[in-house]
Amino acid sequence: MLAKRIIVCLDVRNGKVTKGVKFEGNRDLGDPVEMGAEYYRQGVDELVFYDITASSEGRGIDLEMVRGVAKHVFIPFSVGGGIRNLEDMRAVLLAGAEKVSVNSLAVKDPDIIRQGAKAFGNQCIVLGMDVLKVPVTESVPSGYEVVVKGGRERTGLDAVAWARKAEALGAGEICVNSIDADGTKAGFELEITGKIVAAVGIPVIASGGAGKPEHLAEVLMPEVGADAALVASLTHIDGYTVAQLKDAVRAQGILVR
């Protein structure tokens, strides 16, 4: 079994790390470069930086922030939000990121996944997917619908079907974020995470809802099978160190890096 990963997510708005509940009520927490460097020192496996308002505001990612992170962090990190085309992907990777996450853009123009994978390799392209639990219908048979623009716009896409299509187009990884669980600290959305793990052959990252270290073990267990667990509030607000999170996962018999 491959070792599981612990990933810390830093949502960035106006140059500051911010955190809210279900994408609302955000409060600023600190400088993204400084916070990223601290988590690197703590031994986190990867970092994710999301510019959470770039897409809705129609602007690109802050490349100076990306360069700043790359100067202080020597582990893989991905960047998302505000990616508008292949050149934006190139600029982010040249600024020092290892991966680019596409979400709203991929829904609007799925071929950007294929273009990015062809130009930079599948391992560089992460599909970020925000999902909302909805009634099961013919068009959304999984009961989970893809939403975009920070959860403000529904797409009619079934989450499992979209995951399969993204893999076929060349995505190297999928990050599944539950809008319903985001920031609630009630635990990851195990059902849709497990469904997507079963549907694709690429790594799946679980995101949204971690409230205690045991929640990470739940989603990484073979019954669900996520390859990585993404956290934010646990480290940003609750004060858990990366080592404490890893120890809690190992205590459940799960191999982590």
Image (tube, grey):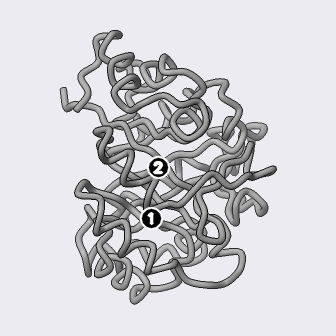
187 to the left or right of 201: right
Answer yes or no: is residue 165 visible. Answer: no
Q: Nearer the viewer, residue 150 or 191?
A: 150
Answer yes or no: is residue 187 visible. Answer: yes
Question: Which residue corresponds to the image point at 78% horizontal and 37% vertical from the top-left?
Answer: 135
- Outermost residue to the left: 1
Vertical arrangement, residue 108 with respect to residue 216, above or below: below
Image-quadrant location for residue 2: top left
Whole-Å distance between the Cαs marked 2 and 1? 9 Å
Q: x and y percent of residue 211 in the render? A: 60, 26
36 to the left or right of 161: left
Vertical arrangement, residue 19 with respect to residue 123, above or below: above
The C terminus is located in which quarter?
top left
- Please rate how many residues cluster around mark 2, counting C-alpha atoms within 10 Å: few if below 14, some from 14 to 19, many from 20: many
Q: Which mark is residue 175?
A: 2
Question: Which residue corresponds to the image point at 44% horizontal and 62% vertical from the top-left?
Answer: 33
Looking at the rendered structure, the secondary structure element under dot 1 is strand
Q: Nearer the viewer, residue 242 or 184?
A: 242
Which amino acid type is marked by label 1?
A: Ser
Image-quadrant location for residue 28: bottom right
Question: Which residue corresponds to the image point at 44% horizontal and 80% vertical from the top-left?
Answer: 63
User: Along the polypeptide, which appears first: circle 2 or circle 1?
Assistant: 1
Q: Where does label 1 land, which residue?
A: 101
The N terminus is located in which quarter?
top left
In contact (CB < 8 Å): disc 2 and disc 1: yes
Q: x and y percent of residue 98 in the render? A: 28, 65
Q: x and y percent of residue 231 in the render? A: 50, 38
Which amino acid type is marked by label 2?
A: Cys
